[in-house]
Each structure stands twice: as structure tokens, then as C-alpha cells.
Image: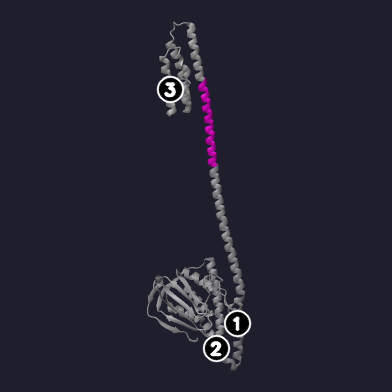
Amino acid sequence: MSFAGGLAVALAIALAIFDSITWIELNVSVLYSLPLVFAAAARKRRLLWTLALSLVAMAFVVYVWQVPLSAVPSARESFFIDRVLSALSVLLCAGILDAWLRSLHVRDRQDRALEQQNDRLEAANSELMAHKEEISSKNQELERARREIEEISQRKTQMLASISHDIRSPIQAITLMAEVIQRAAERPDQAGRIPALAKRLQANAISVVDFLAEVIDVASFDTGRISLADSEFDIDELIAIQCQRVLPIAESKGLSLVTSACNMRLRTDRAKLGRIVGNLVGNAIKFTSIGCVTVSCGVAPDGRVFIKVADTGRGMNPEDLERIFTEFAQADQPPPQSSSGWGLGLAISHRMIRLLRGDIEVQSELQKGSAFTVFLPPSSLVARQATATRLFPGGTA
């Protein structure tokens, strides 16, 4: 029982006792409504009516107790009327307080219903906010997808525009070289030109092959259809094969192609590492007019295997180094070299070496050349022996 309910019961008992021990002329029953106020404050309707009926009964019990049956009827009737009026006031007060309690109960129900409605509205608002955030997230994803599609479309458009030029130039050169070789073969006095013309023809054929390989590599990365096929192989043999492929191009430009044999056996994807080395060596020859291209390999102090391709070409500006590994990014070329490729080789090499869990670094200084270094994880090294130096024939030392 609450404090107000206990106070109501205690006050009712105190008033009943006080009424029973005082004389009949002191009508204490007029105060019987006070305990009902505390019962109503406790919001106990059952307690309210229990006290009300009990106090009404007590009013008449006290009357009977204090007024003997032999008393004067007029006097008896006067006290009786007082008690009746007190009982009626108690019942009236109980009725008013009961109506007040009922109104409070209705208001409480309305408040609870309003709170429940507010809770439902807040839950609905939370769902709407979550749905709004989800829609916003979806819109952001769609916007990113749209930008990616636009970038891919732009790349494809740029690629097709470059293809129309880059594949036409070497094919036209191949056609012209073939015609010149045919004419030289028909004239004995021109037979000495045939070896040089054949080298130029082979160089242009290699350019076309490399070009098509780059297009296939880009398609493989874009479609995600690329995987690793690890095998064990001799790194010197791989470098020699890639250098032999581009040797006609170096000879046609009068360049020396130097390699340092490191007698190491590696375990990684040979085909992809060969593409990386071939791209770097071919790129070095492409942008070098005088001097040499050097390919070296070894083990770095941190245990990683490295393959370094250095040239004596024109080098690059610092701003070019920041974007050199992005697709279609080329260093600013002078007019004679403005059509020397469409910027896929280094981007493909960068993506491939990352696929091999390695890295690639570049150092370059304008008019002094560039050096690209490929790093492979230490786990790729199988065996290592002594080193030597090899100079490929056909170039100028």
C-alpha cells in the first residue's frame, strides 16, 4: 500500500475512535470525508469505496452507541439527521472523487495510447530514416557505378582511338618493308640491304604482337579472368628470352642491351613475370635514342628479389612520375615520339606485379634516363649462385 493509502486508513481509524469517545453533540462524522481525499490521492478506487462505506456505517454505529433508546425522540431525531447528512456528504464526496479517479484513468489511458502512438511514429520515422539512408547509400553506389562505367567507356573510347593509329603504323611499316625486301631481293645490287630491312620488319612485327598482348591483358583485368600459375624457373633464362624478343628493335636503333646474369631460380607465375620484364625492357628501348638498356637482378637487403631495368633515355619530369602507372598515362613526349604508344605497358606491369604480391618502383631524372625496379617477395626465391654480365650482340657498346 502506498503512503497516501496508509495515511487514509490511519486517518479513518483515528476519526472513528475519536467520534466514538466524544459526546454525541460533537458531530465528528462531518470530518469523515477527509480520509477519502487521501484514498483518492493514492488512486485506489476500491480503498475509496471501502473507507466510504465503512465510515458511513461507523457514523450510525456511533450514533446507536452514544444515543440510548430511552432518549427524547426529538433530540434523537436531530442527532440522527446530522448523522444522515454526514453519511450523505461522505457518499457524495466518494462519488465525486470516484468520478475524478475515472477521469484520471481515462486520461492516463489516453496518455498511454498517445505515447504508444508516438513510439510507433518514432519507430516509423526511424524506419523511414534507415530507408532514406539505404536509398542514399544505393544512390551513392549507383553514382559510383555510373562514374566507373563512364570511366570505362572513356577508356574504351580512348583505347579504340589509339588502336586506330597504333596498329595502323606498324602494319603499314611491315607492308612497306616487305615490298622493299621483295624489290631488293629482285635486284642483286640491293641484296646487302636485306638484313637491315628484315630487322626493321621484325621490330615492327614485335610492336604489333606487344600491342595485341597489351589489349588482351587489359581485357583480362577488366573481366577479372586472370589467375596465377606458379612454377619454378631460371630467372636468367626468362630475362634472356624477353631481351631476345626486343633485340631487333634495339639493334635497329643502335642501342646496347646489357644483362647481368644472377643465376637465381624463382617460383612464381613465369608468364606474368615475363610480361612485366618484357614491358619494361621494351618501354626502355622505346624511349631511349642513344646509349644502352641494362637489365640486372639480385636480392635486396630486406630479402626481396629485384629485377632492375635502367636506360639512358630522356627521363621523366617529377609530375610524370606521379601518374606513370595509370592507364593511358604517358610522359610528355617531344614531337618525334608523340605517337610511341598509348600508355598501357606500365599500368599492366603495375597491376601484374601486385597480383604476384610484389611491387614496382621508378627513379628518373630528365635527360639522364630512368630505372624501373620490380620487387618480388622473399618466398619467391628458390636458389641463388654467382653472377656474370652478358652483352647482347647487335648494339653499340
State which tag comes first along the sequence, 3 or 2.
Answer: 3
Q: Residues within 10 Å of mark 1 (few under 14, many from 20)?
A: some
Q: On the image, numbered disc 1 is attached to which residue?
A: 173
Q: Is residue 381 visible?
A: yes
Confirm whether the magenta stretch covers residue 108.
yes
Q: Which residue type carries mark 1?
A: Ala
Residue 11's mark?
3
Which residue range is magenta in the image? 92-120
Residue 208: image location, x then y, percent: 56, 78
Q: Nearer the viewer, residue 173 or 322?
A: 322
Look at discs 3 and 2 and give the one toward the viewer.
3
Which residue appears at 61% of the width and 81% of the height? 172
Corner quadrant of residue 343: bottom right
The residue to which callout 2 is attached is 195
Is there CB contact under 8 Å for labels 3 and 2? no
* Residue 261 point in image, percent of width and height: 42, 80
Does residue 102 show up magenta in the picture?
A: yes
